[in-house]
Image: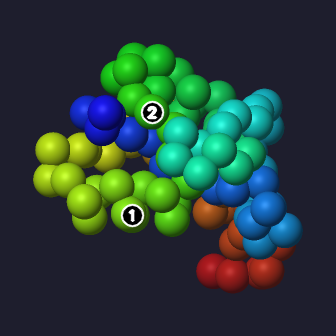
Amino acid sequence: MLPDSIVICFRVSDARAIHLVEGVLKEKCTGCKDDVFISPETMKRKEETQASVYCFDCALALVTKSSRVTIAPPSEGQIEEIKKDIEFHKNKFKLN
């Protein structure tokens, strides 16, 4: 059965390429069962929308297969996490 709503998370195996926000947890991708990282705000969003957790590859395959599946829009909390991550990378790489 296809979910109505999904949230998308980074696979743990891809972690070397990403910066993890504080309080990140591990969960399983509903599709491939690989471990994924889920941020505190994404976990809240998952619970609010009753969304299923998918990695990027499985999410792409799923939304390509069915137009009924929607990606849960980001919450204000998720947007704040993204802004903090952007600032982290700007400082790390000395970007303006």
Left or right of residue 74: residue 56: right
Residue holding disc 2: 52
The picture quadrant where one finds residue 39 is: top right
Residue type, label 2 = Ser
Disc sitting over residue 60 in the figure: 1
Q: Quadrant of the C terminus?
A: bottom right
Residue nearer the viewer, 96 or 49: 49
Residue 73 spot, x, y in % from top left: 32, 42
Left or right of residue 56: residue 13: right
Residue nearer the viewer, 1 or 91: 1
The picture quadrant where one finds residue 21 is: top right
Q: Earlier in the sequence, mark 1 or mark 2?
A: 2
Q: Residue furthest left?
A: 67
Q: Quadrant of the N terminus?
A: top left
Secondary structure of residue under mark 1: helix
Residue 58 is at least partly visible in this image: yes
Packing grade of label 1 (10 A; few <14, some 14-19, many >=20) is: few
Residue 80 is at least partly visible in this image: no
Residue 6 spot, x, y in % from top left: 38, 40
Residue 80 spot, x, y in % from top left: 53, 42
Residue 8 spot, x, y in % from top left: 49, 49
Q: Residue at x 75, y 66 (%)?
A: 14
Q: Residue at x 64, y 55 (%)?
A: 10
Packing grade of label 2 (10 A; few <14, some 14-19, many >=20) is: many
The picture quadrant where one finds residue 70 is: top left
Residue type, label 1 = Leu
In the displayed structure, 90 sits above or below 33; it is below
